[in-house]
Image (cartoon, rainbow, N blue to C red):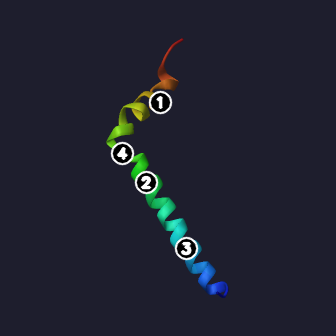
């Protein structure tokens, strides 16, 4: 395995990580938690 193979593997791993984070962020399961977190600066104690 040479350096170009390692670079290719790292590129694929990085892409999969990015796609996973995007899928997690856009998941409907987490929408209520994110909406609540978005309103935190506007809440009074």
Mark 4 neighbour density, 10 Å: few (under 14) some (14–19) many (20 or more):
few
Proximity of marks 2 and 1: CB atoms separated by less than 8 Å: no
- Find numbered disc 3 in the image and state the secondary structure of the residue it sits on: helix
> Which residue of the protein is positioned furthest toward the left in this rendering?
28
Which mark is in front, 1 or 3? 3
Which residue matches tag 1?
37
**21 above or below 6?**
above
Which residue matches tag 3?
11
C-alpha gap between disc 2 and disc 3: 17 Å
C-alpha gap between disc 2 and disc 4: 8 Å
Mark 3 neighbour density, 10 Å: few (under 14) some (14–19) many (20 or more):
few
> Which residue of the protein is positioned furthest toward the right in this rendering?
3
**9 above or below 2?**
above
Residue 11 % position (x, y): 55, 73
**13 above or below 22?**
below
At a point 51% along the width and 60% down the height, the residue shown is: 17
Residue 45 % position (x, y): 54, 11
Mark 2 neighbour density, 10 Å: few (under 14) some (14–19) many (20 or more):
few
- Find numbered disc 1 in the image and state the secondary structure of the residue it sits on: helix
Q: Quadrant of residue 8?
A: bottom right
Which residue matches tag 4?
27
C-alpha gap between disc 2 and disc 1: 18 Å
Which residue matches tag 2?
22
Counting residues from the start of the chain, the first of labels 2 and 4 encountered is: 2
| Relative horizontal placement of residue 11, taking residue 30 as reference (left or right) | right
């Amino acid at each position: 395995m040479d350096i170009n193979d390692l670079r290719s593997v790292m590129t694929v791993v990085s892409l999969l990580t990015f796609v996973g984070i995007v899928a997690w962020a856009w998941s409907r399961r987490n929408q209520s938690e994110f909406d609540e977190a978005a309103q935190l600066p506007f809440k009074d104690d």
